[in-house]
Amino acid sequence: MFSSKSKEKTTPKKTTKSNPSPSAGAVSVLIASTTIEGNFDTENDLRLEGTVKGEVTVNGKVVLGESGLIEGTLNAAEAVIHGRVVGNLYVNHLLQLASTAVIEGDISASQFSVQEGAVYRGKCNIGKGV
C-alpha cells in the first residue's frame, strides 16, 4: 500500500496538432467563464458567452450572448449582438442588435437591424460597399 520508493518525476511532452480545415457548419463556442486577452480569430461561426479583450475576427457568423463582452474591435461576415461591445464593429453583411445589446463604438455594416431597447453610442455607416 505504501512504498518507500521515490516516484520518478515525469516531464510533460509537447504535442503538435495539425490545423484541420474548417468544417462546414462548425461553431466555435467560448463559454461564460472564459476570458481571452489578445486577438481571437476563427474560420467557423462563433458563439461567444465569455469575454475577449482584443480583436475578434470571424469569417462566418458571430453570436454574442447576453453574458458576452468584447473589449476591442469585432470583424465578422455577419453578427447578432445580445451582449456588450466596447469597440468598433465591422460587419460585411447583416448586423443585428438585440434588445439587450450595448454598443460603445462605431459601426460599419452593409445591413443593420436594431430591436427596441438596444443601446448604441457611436457613429454608424450602413450600406453596400461600406
Image: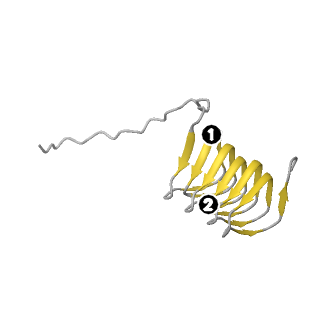
Residue with the mark numbered 2: 82
What amino acid is found at the position of numbered circle 2 in the picture? Answer: His
What is the distance, in whole Å, between disc 1 and disc 2 at their CAs? 19 Å
In this view, the residue in front, 99 or 78, is 99
Depth-wise, is mark 1 or mark 2 nearer the camera? 2
Q: Secondary structure at mark 2?
A: loop
Colour setup of the view: secondary structure
Q: Residue at x 57, y 29 (%)?
A: 18
Q: Residue at x 65, y 64 (%)?
A: 101
Residue 104 percent across, percent down from the top left: 72, 67
Image check: 16 left or right of 53?
left
The furthest residue to the front? 116
Image check: 81 left or right of 5?
right
Q: Residue at x 51, y 58 (%)?
A: 32
Image check: 90 left or right of 128?
left
Residue 106 percent across, percent down from the top left: 79, 62
Residue with the mark numbered 1: 44
Q: Secondary structure at mark 1?
A: loop
